[in-house]
Amino acid sequence: MNVQLELPLAHPTTATLSRRLPAWLKREIPRANANHFTAGLLEELRLETVCDNAKCPNRMECYSQKTATFMILGNVCTRPCGFCAVGRGRPEALEADEPARVAKAAARLGLEHVVITSVTRDDLPDGGAEHFYQCVLAVRERTGASVEVLTPDFVTCKQALNRVIEAAPEVFNHNTETVPRLYRQVRGPKSDYRWTLELLRRIKERNPTIKTKSGLMLGLGETTEEVLNVLSDLRAASCDFLTLGQYLMPSATTADHYLPVVRYIPPDEFAWLGRAAKSLGFKQVASGPFVRSSYHAREMAEMY
């Protein structure tokens, strides 16, 4: 892959990792009553968010702006991904009223763009696709908001993907997460890089009006060339939007449960990769240490 952009001074493939967080990964915590409003509403309606369960570093900022990424299908995942703080084990039964509760929360928060994600449910015949479908329709009917879904890979029930596509979310996000060399290590033995690309390709084939989106975590040991090759593959699959962010270990106290951070990528390298992604043809790109899949998702969707 040959991208005609000048590399930053510190080449992305070289660095050593300090035990302490670098200065660019330290931020002030927003303090506002909206934090309590959002948290209280979610508790009242018995809703889960990826913000809480995945220990997102942007949680307080998003809650203070009365927004959150809803996490459906419970809070227990059937996949043992080495980067994720979401609980693992045997999930509970689906809650039939969850779509209505998600829609109610979106309405009370005044959301104009609603992001819905989930745990992976390999225990369900359709991987939870019907539940996604019902949530999208419930939110749209009650609020009129645009909807973005961030789904698992449905690799054990590939045809179920079609049901989510039938809901016609404005944005369909499925994260690539990392480069092919690290795929099984990061995403687990059931993951399949080729299927990730095929999933995004199928969405466009069945409904070209849906904007597709994907993202990668950086700092797991990938090289710049590997990242650029993935971006090229995503564009070949007609992926529209891209997010690039820094992988952070969910908890230092249980480090043996999670993949280690191999490297903290400086902001100028994220900026370089963002420019490289734009040169490859992505319609919208968010690239920075604190960028996450649904961070400023409404702005990204509306700008295109």
Image: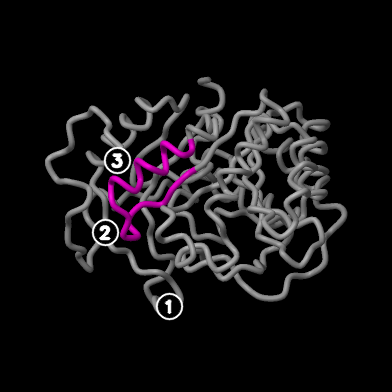
Residue holding disc 3:
270
Colouring style: one colour
Three-letter residue code for mark 1: Thr
Residue holding disc 1:
254
Residue holding disc 2:
263
Q: Say left or right for 94 vs 152.
A: right
Reply yes or no: does residue 222 show up in magenta. Answer: yes
Q: Is residue 197 above or below residue 183?
A: above
Q: Is residue 23 above or below residue 188?
A: above
User: If the image is split into quadrants, where does the N terminus sit?
Assistant: top left
Q: Secondary structure at mark 2?
A: loop
Q: Where is residue 13? Give x, y as percent.
A: 22, 52
Q: How many marks?
A: 3
What residue range appears in magenta?
A: 215-234
Three-letter residue code for mark 2: Arg
Three-letter residue code for mark 3: Phe
Which badge, 1 or 3, is on the more N-terminal residue? 1
Q: Compute the Cα span from label 3 to label 2.
A: 13 Å
